[in-house]
Amino acid sequence: MRITDGMLTAASLASIQRSQSRAFDAQEQVTTGRRINHASDDADGAARAVRLRGQLAGIQRQGQNADAATSWLEATESALGEVTSILQRARELTVQAGNDTLSATNRAAIADEIDQLLESVRDQANTALDGRQLFSGAQTSTRPYAAGSDGYLGGRSGQDVVALDIGPGVSVQVNTPGLALFGEGTAAADGAVFDTLRTLSAEIRAGTTPNLRALDRNMTAIADARAAAGATQNRVDAAKSRLQDLETATTKLLSDTEDADMAKAILTLSTQQSAYQAALQSGASVLQHPTLMDFLK
Amino acid sequence: MPISSFMGLETSLRGLLAQQRALDVTSHNIANADRTGYTRQEAVMAAAPALAVPGAFQSGGTGQLGQGVDVQAYRRLRDSFADLQFRAASMSYGDGATRASALDQVDDAFGEPSDSGLNAALSTFFDSWDALAANPESSAAKQVVVGTATALASAFNALDGRLAALAGNAATEYADLTGPNGAVMNAAGELQRLNVAIRDAVQGGGSPNDLLDRRDEILDGLSQLGQVSVTDVGNGMISVQFGDAASPLVDATNAVNAPVGMTAPGGKLGALLGVQATIAGYRTSLDTVAAQLAGAVNAAQGGTTFFTGATAATLAAGVTAAGVQTTGTGAAGANELARAVAALRNGAVQAGYADLVHTMGADAATADRAAQTGKALVDAADSRRQSTNGVSLDEEMTNMVRFQRGYQASARAMSTMDEMLDVLINRTGRVGL
């Protein structure tokens, strides 16, 4: 093949440009630390990265939801724990009041204390977490048992569930409906906590033998509710740790997908830089190569 | 028949002149060595017609006495097949490079994967709904939902706007190139003038090498813009069919016709048309994603119009914070509608968008590869062509020495002849003086 001067210069320019462009790509990977800087770098990888980023955002957000669920459940459990202690005290007082030797004054004192305990239960039933009522069903802005009126004001059937999503397709009910535990409040003979305490107080004051069965039933119900909240908490904890595993795995997958293998990228960069230098050197010598002219006298 | 005593002088003179012309051509080649589009030339030398000398030999036969050398033509060393190959490669390179550059800009417009693209805006939007579900009483959380929805809608609007602008740029560039003062019509006008000049030269018996170079250069330039096919119509004139235009750009009567109504012209112009269609496809897909988002969110919001508009360009948040629905039950702490929207996360909307990014990325990568391959092919075709028509300085130096020696030798022959005549004219008949 006949070689001409134009071919030599064009070829060396083309090879210099090619190596420069490869060195540029390698440099971009090293400086950004990412293998995929544009969707065109790897279309499959880019689409996967887009999906993984969406999933990762969801996982992180659901982790925050799990934390919110934990706050609800812990506050509920602590309030119900308080209620249990109060009912315990009410039971002791009731047993004490069953002693026939007590005078009417003593019984009245016990009845007064039970009335006070009822108010304490009301305080617990009105517990709010960050301004949100725990035992009011979904009517979280309404105090379920307002002082004075005493009747249940919170959400009833259809408005009694507060749920949170704590994982892909996983949701838990975080609230414990107060109506079932504490009852309607005012004068309703529903056998719930308020009714029971009010009945006990009246019975003690009147001198009739107080009936403990209702109170025991209430205590069992509260204990069951605590156990249920605890069980939900366990689910939330499990979901939370699953989310953490998932976050780790997804982050790793995302990194594998779009991040550059730095060792490899740096090696490639220095290889490409050497290649570029070599292309420049050979280009320089091609451009200044001697011709016959240099030897003709 | 006697032969003139001075014939030898004439023969030497022919030699001197021919070598001088050849040196002229060599220096023309050297002067144009680094000019693109130049085709090297050579002086074609051939023996001058011999002089018939009857009775030159004892046998009585007619002798043929050579009369030296003449320059017959100045030949242009060009391989027209290499031209065809170069133009085909140049056309596909024009297509690939234009497409790659346009789709690179589309790729930049999407800007995925990143923390700031549409995908991130979608995640932020769903995050705000999850936050609202965890805090349904909070009007601040509702305000955040409206804020992220507005940001998401603007992200859709902006991306669609960028895509529309890029398609518009391609359309404008196409119109500029094919318009009355565009590159195509300018080339056509010049081809027309060159055709006339070449015809005149050819009819005058000349070989207008440098005009032919210029015409080939223009055809090379045109071939990058679109498909070029050349037909020789005689007298050195050509007609040129460009792209898939109905009438030839330069027809057999050397009239210029504007390239109108092209649908697949090939080359850069073909890419400019193709890119517009490709971008229109992306915009349709983006519209589908936007419509899906608006439809799904509005449905999850219990039929209230949370998003207005069902295309990427018109999507907008249609509610104030007070209009954000968390529940249909009326209870402040209920969150089923907020959760319903949050549950759309990683659903059809994001999958549709990821698919769009995939399609776009794959198209851009294919175009990039095509541009690189096209560049390599053009370089190879150009190199093959240069191999025939390029100037090699070593070769020219060799020729220069060759012709210089030839000139010297002819001059020497002439001096010898001169001395011979000197003997004949000045010394003959002076014996003994």
Image (tube, coloured by chain):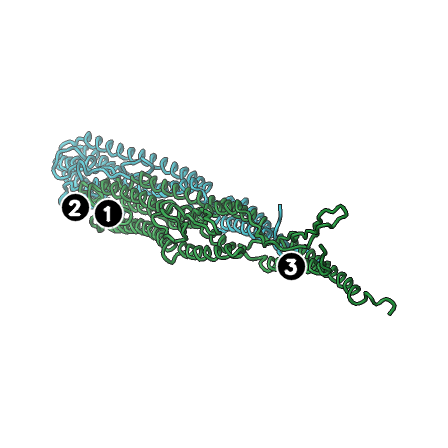
Q: Residue furthest top?
A: A213
- Identified by mark 1, the residue type is Gly
Give the labeled residue for mark 2. Answer: A147
Mark 1 Cα-neighbour bin, 10 Å: few <14, some 14–19, many ≥20: some
> Residue A232 placed where, x, y %?
31, 35
Front residue of B200/B57: it is B57
On screen, residue B245 versus residue B305, left or right, reads right
Are discs 2 and 3 less than 8 Å apart at CB? no
Front residue of A178/A291: it is A291
Q: Earlier in the sequence, mark 1 or mark 3?
A: 3
Chain painted in cyan in the figure = A
Mark 2 Cα-neighbour bin, 10 Å: few <14, some 14–19, many ≥20: few
Cα distance between the residues tagged 2 and 1 = 50 Å
Q: Which residue is found at the position 36% from the left and 57% from the top?
A: B180
Q: Chain of mark 2?
A: A
| Same subunit, tags 2 and 3 | no
Give the labeled residue for mark 3. Answer: B23
Mark 3 Cα-neighbour bin, 10 Å: few <14, some 14–19, many ≥20: many
- Residue A89 lies in quadrant: top left
